[in-house]
Amino acid sequence: MWETILSGIFAFVPALVANSLAVVFGGGSPMDLGREIGGKRILGDGKTWRGFIGGGASAGLIGLLLTLTPLSLYSSLWIPFALSYGSMTGDLLGSLVKRRGGWERGENVPVLDQYDFVLGAFLISIICYPAWTLETYFSGHGYVTLAMLLVAVPALHRGVNIIGYRMGLKKEPW
Ligand code: CTP
Ligand code: MG
């Protein structure tokens, strides 16, 4: 049982690190090209193509590296990329919601900031790899894996962001 749970947690690493890696690659033209709707930016300057593509690709590659461990993680080697790009997409949707709600770029919105990418990762993963996703996170021991992930995510997210902030990569420590 513990090996199954540990595998499920390791398998989710691409979703967990994608946003932090986006900070490293970020810059250049914003995805919304500066456009506004109703006097508010669509996504804001914090969402760039370089961050989206670079964060998703590098986090997916980290997932591939993890397959070199003895844990059995994925039924397809594209799954880490579904998780990493799903995570980046969830982060985009989170910013969309933040801008509509009137929150400025970088403003801290509890719950939304910590779970938008988790939701995005599960959504894309379940659409692209339903059997694997259901078996790993939504059945039997998978529910224990899911519960552990959901409890650990805010702490992990905060930890990684503090590291990024100390390294001078991130403007805010959240
Ligand atoms: N980033 C990026 N492109 C993305 C996601 C993130 O370039 N698609 C980079 C940006 O430099 C961004 C940083 O990663 O500032 C931190 O990401 P995040 O905290 O998600 O963005 P915020 O700047 O806080 O903006 P928002 O309020 O929209 O979340
Ligand atoms: Mg932020």
Image (cartoon, helix red, strand yellow):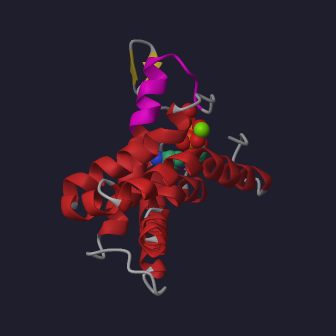
Residue drawn at x 63%, y 28% as measured from the top left: 107
Q: Position of residue 36 (x, y in %)?
A: 41, 22
Q: Quadrant of the C terminus?
A: top right
Quarter, ligand 2? top right
Residue 7 included in the magenta stretch of the image: no
Q: Quadrant of the N terminus?
A: bottom left
Please indicate whether residue 99 sits to the left or right of residue 173 in the image.
left
Q: Is residue 66 visible?
A: yes
Relative to the observer, which residue lies in front, 96 or 34?
Answer: 96
Q: Position of residue 138 (x, y in %)?
A: 31, 53
On screen, residue 104 above or below 10:
above
Q: Is residue 28 visible?
A: no
Please indicate whether residue 130 sits to the left or right of residue 169 in the image.
left
Quarter assignment of residue 20: bottom right
Relative to the observer, which residue lies in front, 14 or 148?
Answer: 148
Q: Position of residue 62 (x, y in %)?
A: 49, 73
How many labels sit on residues? 0
Please indicate whether residue 43 sits to the left or right of residue 21 in the image.
left
Q: Position of residue 22 (x, y in %)?
A: 53, 55
Range of residues picked out in magenta = 93-105
Residue drawn at x 38%, y 53% as measured from the top left: 143
Q: Seen from this angle, which residue lies furthest top?
A: 38
